Amino acid sequence: MEEERVEQTPPPPPPSYIHIETNDFLHRRHKRQKEEDIAVCECQYNLLDPDSACGDRCLNVLTSTECTPGYCRCGVYCKNQRFQKSQYAATRLVKTEGRGWGLLADENIMAGQFVMEYCGEVISWKEAKRRSQAYENQDLTDAYIIYLNADESIDATKKGSLARFINHSQPNCETRKWNVLGEVRVGIFAKQDIPIGIELSYDYNFEWFGGAMVRCLCGAGSCSGFLGAKSRGFQEATYLWEDDDDRFSVENVPLYDSTDDEPTSIPKDILLIKDEPFTQDGSNNSIQNTENPIIASSSEFTPMNVEPLNGSIECGAQYAEDALQNSTCEVANLQSQSAPRGNNHTELVAVKRRPALRGGKAKRGMHKQLNVAGICDRFASEVAREEILYCEEMKNQAAAQIDGLYDEIRPAIEEHERDSQDSVATSLAEKWIEASCCKYKADFDLYASIIKNLASTPLRSKEDAASKDQNGVMISRVMGKSEHGNLLVSLSDGLPHYSLAAAVGLAIGVAGLCKALHSSLVTPCVPQNKLFSNSERLYYVGGLKNLGNNCFLNVILQALASCDGFVSSLDNLLGSEDVLPEEKSERMPLIFALSSLIKDLSVVRDERTELSPHRVMDALSFYVGHFNLTREQA
Ligand SMILES: C[S@@+](CC[C@H](N)C(=O)[O-])C[C@H]1O[C@@H](n2cnc3c(N)ncnc32)[C@H](O)[C@@H]1O
């Protein structure tokens, strides 16, 4: 029997496009890197250690910045010029089932390896929108526009690199942005080892400017069903109006609201606690939080071990909770704003989100207010009252400042929530960070002032105070010493609960503070207008250099620098006798780097000074495998 011969017709070639290996700028010129903007690393080539020439520990690599030729001491050995030298992995084009053309690995690719650059025409956001619509009108189903930043996109439809053929699927690759000679460029990087012959894929969500809705055929169980369903292409429909390059959204755009965040897990060691529970009346009641069931029911909670002082002093209600809420929310806010998606980043405080309020209105300012007047009323000292009221005024001003700013930067935050890590303009981010730092500082000063006065000034009798203010808060206080000798103060509104929030907020903020108070390190409430009051000169504390996208880290460092207790705790750790002084930087690199940077940050100078967080970042990489600052934020 004659065998039927099936003619294998080769698939038609992919629709023509112009192959390029560097971006083509349509609406502006390629930026020229200014000499003062060139980041020079500290690597030195060592024949015996090939990684010495700008490998994983290179400060530029850590900040996703390529070394500038001629400025890197490793010269030709520098391994950190992969975009510039088009050091791509070997790949092969194939025709797929139902998904057009795709790209296969043509060699074994290692996790973290740079696969290739996503090149195309760099166009403005408006042009991207126009083109996307035009392609849709032309019935082009394949879309090739991805985001570069809030203002620009890369269109690889007519011109592009092979990366334009990578399909969407359960991703074995991801996009990362790198700073190359002053321009941001998008690279495809392997998320895992990819054996030869396996198709490359990345997640189009967020990255993609898909015009038409295309049903996704990737087959993954978790797939949203459409390509780039969370991408801006879809989000476009939710914008209500535009004003030049700004877009304003309608109510169904989920807004981020920091006050929606609740701590869901708290590192136990922050609590400095063990043994039996305590209550404010010294009995053995179990700890409940009637007002915040989420916090109260957390299985992470461990009650404090304190020695109740004789007698009880009463104090104003929710400020510890308020303090924690503010601080965790702000940290969470910054994490949320800065953390790129899909990272295994280590979170300082795990947060969960609740749906935004209808109408997209932020709930800012809705958290419980501290009754400062009620608290002040209990202090016998006029000076103490004045100081606390002054701090409250500062806190209110800082809150008003940040609320005002929030409206201004909200479009950018929304943008950032959906888009990439660097889409918030630096000037806006800086304003926000500055205001956040002021808010932290003002909050901290107020709580510090109250606690300091509780610890050091006489109180009026309960009856005395109550007779003045029938509606005044019930105040109670339990003070004790933790096992480390730190004074712990817990405050409650008289209800039989000690919230987790209070416990943690106090443990974090107060332990350090009280310790500092005891050693006279802190004068928390020096009114600013009295600082240098006889001087005409301006004084500054150091600023932190933005080495790429490390503003999130900078704000945390700034906030920590204003907590004297934190600095002294670092000193205590460094003072440990188990480690020889000369070994400290090696054996405790992070603590060492943090301590010296934070000390530097606390110095008041008569000129502006820019400090570099390089060493801290460098030390972080000891603890976080493959630490990449711009990817693993917070
Ligand atoms: C950047 S291109 C990828 C290369 C494209 N397959 C080609 O032949 O040129 C994106 C387009 O590929 C197709 N595509 C990619 N991933 C897909 C998937 N999981 N399911 C269906 N189509 C997909 C869609 O048409 C999409 O607009």
Image: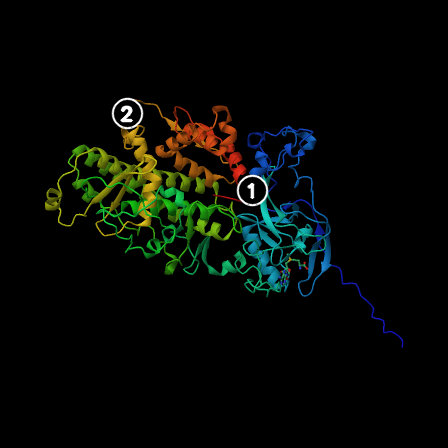
Q: Which residue is mark 1?
A: 625
Where does the N terminus fall, quadrant-wise? bottom right
Q: Nearer the viewer, residue 493 or 326?
A: 493
Q: Position of residue 596 (x, y in %)?
A: 45, 28
Residue 196 visible from this viewpoint = yes
**Of the image marks 2 and 1, the number of the one nearer the N terminus:** 2
Question: Marks 2 and 1, Cα distance to the nearest angstrom?
Answer: 49 Å
Circle 1 packing at 10 Å, graded few (<14), some (14-19), many (20+), is few
Q: Position of residue 239 (x, y in %)?
A: 46, 58
Q: Nearer the viewer, residue 609 or 30?
A: 609
Q: Is residue 511 left or right of residue 144?
A: left
Label 2 SS: loop
**Amino acid residing under circle 2:** Ser
Give the tally of numbered discs. 2
Query: What residue occupies the far bottom of the structure in this picture?
Result: 1
- Give the foreground label among 2 and 1: 1
Is residue 506 depicted above or below 10 in this figure? above
**Occupied quadrant, residue 393:** top left
Is residue 74 depicted above or below 291 in this figure? above
Query: What residue occupies the far right of the structure in this picture?
Result: 1
Q: Which residue is mark 2?
A: 533
Label 1 SS: loop
Q: Is residue 44 left or right of residue 256?
A: right
At 44% across and 42% down in the image, what residue appears?
Answer: 428
Is residue 245 depicted above or below 567 in this figure? below
The image's mark for residue 142 is: none
**Occupied quadrant, residue 601:** top left
**Amino acid residing under circle 1:** Gly
Circle 2 packing at 10 Å, graded few (<14), some (14-19), many (20+), is few
